[in-house]
């Protein structure tokens, strides 16, 4: 059954990738349970739909914004809201403060990955005025909690492995399953990883590669994206 009920010509691979992403969020990751990962999905949606907070305000400092039965630490809820609504305001000091509140460095990477994916999927639906992907029940299971042996802080705030390639890949390399998850969503939306540097004239979608890059560059500028 299609994820999106619409007369719009939504490509099948997009529809399928969004449903697959939601299914993966319901499973235990490397550092968080399926219940916690779905709670991140819910917090992204709460952050998007709530009255906006200033970048320096956190849900944990506002009465009533942190749900009493949340399976997430308050620090993680604060991360989800900040990443969702004010990603251009992150600083190394802010990141250090989150780690200082007990969030592990690679557990933070997994939060960033899930939040980025949820925003990708939900903003697609919101832009086309479609229902967001429904949330399933969480699957049982515990996080693996295993870090790559060569993960260390190099050029980024977070531990990475020496995989080469662009920073958007490297930043998630400390949690390999999240790097794979990024690729599963990126390919139907953009290009396969191996084609990023080689295929500069792709027209497999309705937009040519140069048109895609122009829109991406303009969007990054408007979002104050340092990448």
Image (spheres, rainbow, N blue to C red):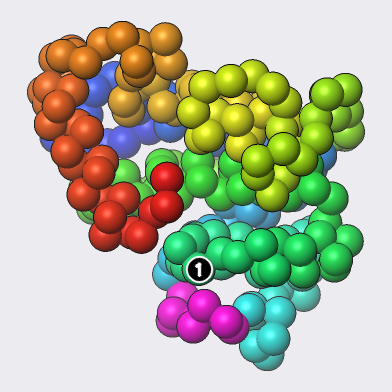
Foreground of the two, 80 or 140: 80
Report whether residue 46 is seen. Answer: no
What residue lies at 61% left-to-right and 48% top-to-bottom?
112
On the image, the x and y values in percent for residue 75 come to 76, 67
* Residue 48 colored in magenta in the image: no
Query: Taking 160 as reference, is 31 left or right?
Result: right
Specify the quadrant that holds the N terminus.
top left
What residue lies at 69% left-to-right and 49% top-to-bottom?
157
Instruction: Determine the image quadrant of residue 67.
Output: bottom right
Residue placed under numbered mark 1 in the picture: 89
Report whether residue 61 is seen. Answer: yes
What residue lies at 84% left-to-right and 50% top-to-bottom?
104
Query: Taking 83 as reference, is 133 left or right?
Result: left
Specify the quadrant that holds the C terminus.
top left
On the image, the x and y values in percent for residue 169 come to 55, 29
Examine the rendered structure and indicate whether residue 120 appears above or below residue 89.
above
On the image, the x and y values in percent for residue 218 come to 21, 49
Foreground of the two, 205 or 16: 205
Query: Taking 175 as reference, is 179 left or right?
Result: left
On the image, the x and y values in percent for residue 143 come to 85, 34
Foreground of the two, 123 or 69: 123
Mark 1 lies on a secondary structure that is helix
Segment tinted magenta in the rendering: 50-57
Q: How many marks?
A: 1
Examine the rendered structure and indicate whether residue 196 appears above or below residue 120.
above
- Type of secondary structure dominating the magenta stretch: loop
Query: Taking 4 as reference, is 128 left or right?
Result: left
Report the residue that reaches farthest toward the bottom: 63
């Amino acid at each position: 059954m299609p994820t999106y009920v619409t007369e719009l010509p939504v490509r099948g691979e997009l529809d399928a990738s969004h449903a697959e992403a939601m299914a993966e969020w319901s499973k235990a990751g490397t550092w968080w349970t399926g219940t916690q990962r779905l709670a991140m999905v819910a917090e992204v949606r709460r952050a998007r739909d709530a009255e906006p907070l200033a970048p320096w305000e956190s849900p944990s400092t506002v009465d009533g914004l942190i749900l009493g039965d949340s399976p997430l630490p308050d620090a993680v809820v604060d991360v989800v809201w900040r990443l969702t609504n004010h990603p251009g305001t992150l600083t190394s000091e802010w990141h250090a403060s989150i780690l200082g509140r007990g969030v592990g460095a690679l557990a933070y990477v997994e939060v960033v990955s899930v939040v980025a994916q949820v925003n990708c999927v939900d903003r697609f639906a919101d832009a086309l005025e479609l229902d967001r992907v429904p949330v399933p029940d969480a699957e049982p299971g515990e996080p693996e909690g295993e870090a790559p042996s060569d993960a260390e802080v190099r050029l980024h705030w977070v531990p990475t492995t020496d995989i080469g390639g662009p920073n958007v890949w490297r930043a998630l390399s400390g949690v390999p399953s999240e790097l794979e998850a990024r690729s599963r969503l990126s390919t139907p939306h953009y290009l396969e990883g191996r084609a990023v540097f080689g295929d500069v004239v792709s027209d497999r979608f309705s937009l040519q590669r140069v048109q895609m890059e122009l829109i991406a560059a303009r969007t990054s500028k408007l979002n104050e994206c340092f990448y």
